[in-house]
Image (tube, rainbow, N blue to C red):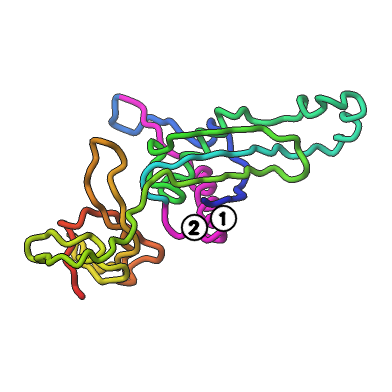
Amino acid sequence: MIELTLPYPISANRYWRTYLPRGCAAPVTTVSPEARAYQDRVRRAAREAGVHCPFPGRVAVSYVLYPKRPLDWKRRQRMNPARWDDSVQCMDLDNAQKVLFDAMEGIVYENDNLIRRIEGERAVPDGDARVLVTVESMQDLVEPVADSGLDVDETAGNLPLDKRFPVNCRVMTPTGRLARVRRYLVGSSKQDHFERLICEYADGTRANDWVTLQPQFLVKLD
């Protein structure tokens, strides 16, 4: 589980840009330059919090949205002690959620369609505008398999996954890039029984670069 303090989301109207490219019959919707700048801020905040790769598989996300506290908050509080913050300008949770979840995709989790549980809350403003996010993996990781003492044939492919590809061993991906095995992953549903390895690229091409692949697509190098 990780907890992040992220910048206050920009509005959906500013996040997405719709335009009609020259020569096209239908308009195209894409993220705006302002949205890309917000994504960069989210990425930096995540890195500073120690998030170096997305959670694999299903996740649960909860967030608390804090609007900016206005300068006259004390006057508002005197006038309506119980509900003074109802008059504070704040984007609605649905709007904030769409922008926030899109911005975290590929940074905190692999894809926002893997979010299986959501909790959202608007908090009483207490200072700067921000959003507090908690992300928890719902994925079952494969535990190391104890040595049973039975004879196994590595060429037959019946070795346990952690024996075929020990943690930190070097592998080559289908694209020819070098990587190291970091974790193991089991299927995420009754229909998904595939084993997977979560690998970190080790060729120096790009920092914090990860990939998740089935073992048959990897070549063990050591």
Q: Which amino acid type is shown beneath numbered disc 1? A: Ala
Asked if residue 25 lies left or right of residue 134, the reply is: left
Q: What residue is rendered at 92% in x and 28% in y?
A: 78
Neighbor class of circle 2 (other Cα within 10 Å; few <14, some 14-19, many 20+) is some
Residue 69: % across, % down:
78, 39
The answer for how far apart the CA atoms under marks 2 and 1 are is 9 Å
Neighbor class of circle 1 (other Cα within 10 Å; few <14, some 14-19, many 20+) is some
- Check if residue 39 falls in the magenta segment: yes
Q: Which amino acid type is shown beneath numbered disc 2? A: Val
Q: What residue is rendered at 63% in x and 42% in y?
A: 131
Which of the pair 201/72 is nearer the observer?
Answer: 201
Residue 207: % across, % down:
40, 66
Using the rendered view, name the quadrant where residue 80 is placed: top right
Residue 154: % across, % down:
11, 66
Reply above or below: 170 against 29: below
Q: Give the SS element for disc 2.
A: loop
Q: Give the SS element for disc 1.
A: helix
Which of the pair 8/183 is nearer the observer?
Answer: 183
Q: What residue is rendered at 28% in x and 67% in y?
A: 179
Give the residues drawn in magenta, as a range: 26-54
Q: What residue is rendered at 87% in x and 35% in y?
A: 72
Residue 51 disc label = 2
Q: Which residue is mark 1?
A: 45
